[in-house]
Image: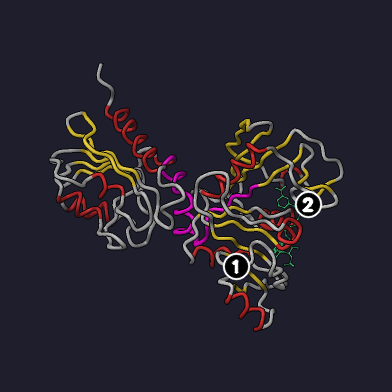
Amino acid sequence: MALPKKKIDEYYMRGALSLALRGTGKVSPNPLVGCVVVKDGSVVSRGWHRAFGLPHGEAMALEGKKDFRGATLYVNLEPCSHTGKTPPCAPLIAERGISRVVAGMVDPDPRVQGRGVSLLREKGIEVETGLLEAECRWLNRGFIRRNTLGRPWVTVKGALSLDGGMALESGESKWITGPSARSLAHLLRGESDAVLIGTGTASKDDPELTVRSTWGRSPLRALLDSRFSLSEKAKMYGRGTLVVTDGSEGEEKRASARRAGMDLLAAPGEHGGLSLPLVLSALAERGVSTLLVEGGPGVIASFFREGLVDSVSLFLSPRIMGRNLPFSGDLSFSSMGETIMLKNASVKEVGEDFLIEGVPACSPAL
Ligand SMILES: NC(=O)c1ccc[n+]([C@@H]2O[C@H](COP(=O)([O-])OP(=O)(O)OC[C@H]3O[C@@H](n4cnc5c(N)ncnc54)[C@H](OP(=O)(O)O)[C@@H]3O)[C@@H](O)[C@H]2O)c1
């Protein structure tokens, strides 16, 4: 018995989605794109965007001399209509004789936003959009946030004891979780465009914030440090670090940081401290679509207080730490109704620990 057309379309779109995933950590600030071309019931070509600056998924799938006339092209994102680092995909699809395009979602990039679909239709190509749209939007959640809200997708990551502690009262936090959880945390880093901590974590832990013990490129390191107290001996002092201050540090400090290859940003808050919205928009301007907040309770509480957390990845150790620095810092609510509930929460075993992930109900819809 033949499968319904929608089921067949979904099957190939899932193929495009899994191809797109291969570009994770390599294509940003571009979106993840995978593409499957089907002719006479068989897959004749596949492609995906491998890395920033390389051909888009559709262009890779349409390379070579194959006869694509009459084929259907499945792609998780609307084909682009503008020239960026590479030529636009929509005219190429028309040139290669594709007769039907199934796209998972319209591209939120203001340079595209439906223009790719219009161009294809003008060329007489049948176009459908919105197949497995929720999955397609989730895959490119960072790209969508940056293009629609002008900020990255923000994930809070932390290692917690069963009683919710991020460190002992003394500040000691090495190590709450085991090696498997720590390796997975490095993988999350490798998938992110930037990681962010506050000066409390920088001074207590002196982290490198690079990707080690797994694959992936090291992300941009962002530090919230109002008075620029980071020691020149700190592991993150140097190239690849953005220090956010209130702008009050002297010119001498600024000059030596720049000599060390660091990037500086002044983002004073209206009521003292630093402004997280300013930090996030500056990161988005630098092409950051996904941000991993790896700070301590001070920074984490601020992100929650300002409703700027889109997802959490919490590694929970089956360990009781007693009096501790609680994960949610000084967050405080006067009723259960105000507390932060996670949607679509999931739990996974990771070695001797558990990874709990979810999306706070207050995170704006994708
Ligand atoms: N278990 C884990 O996963 C984990 C992860 C990270 C840290 N930790 C532990 O957490 C402890 C450090 O906690 P912490 O809260 O001091 O570290 P933190 O959250 O990384 O840093 C807090 C500091 O960031 C600066 N900051 C600037 N702008 C801010 C803003 N808008 N909101 C909040 N903070 C802002 C403030 O210092 P200025 O006013 O000087 O700018 C503030 O004191 C350490 O013991 C560390 O080991 C544990």
Checking the image for residue 238, the label placed there is 1
Is the N terminus in the top left, top right, bottom left or bottom right quadrant? top left
**Residue 2 vertical position relative to residue 202 in the rendered view, above or below:** above
**Residue 347 vertical position relative to residue 63 in the rendered view, above or below:** above
User: Which residue type does callout 1 highlight?
Assistant: Gly
Queried whether the magenta region covers residue 156, the answer comes back as yes
Mark 1 vs mark 2, CA separation in Å: 36 Å
Mark 2 CB within 8 Å of ligand 1: no
* Label 1: which secondary element: loop
> Does residue 193 appear in the picture of this structure?
yes
- Which sits in the foreground, 173 or 227? 173
Residue sitting farthest toward the bottom: 251
Queried whether the magenta region covers residue 3, the answer comes back as no
User: Which residue type does callout 2 highlight?
Assistant: Ser
* Label 2: which secondary element: loop
List x then y, in percent, for residue 265: 59, 72
- Highlighted magenta segment, given as a residue range: 135-157
> Does residue 271 appear in the picture of this structure?
no
Mark 1 CB within 8 Å of ligand 1: no
Q: Mark 2 — residue?
A: 332
List x then y, in percent, for residue 297: 74, 53
Describe residue 316's horizontal placement relative to residue 102 as left or right: right
List x then y, in percent, for residue 196: 62, 58
Q: Earlier in the sequence, mark 1 or mark 2?
A: 1
Residue beneath the point at 68% across and 70% down: 232
- Which sits in the foreground, 289 or 254? 254
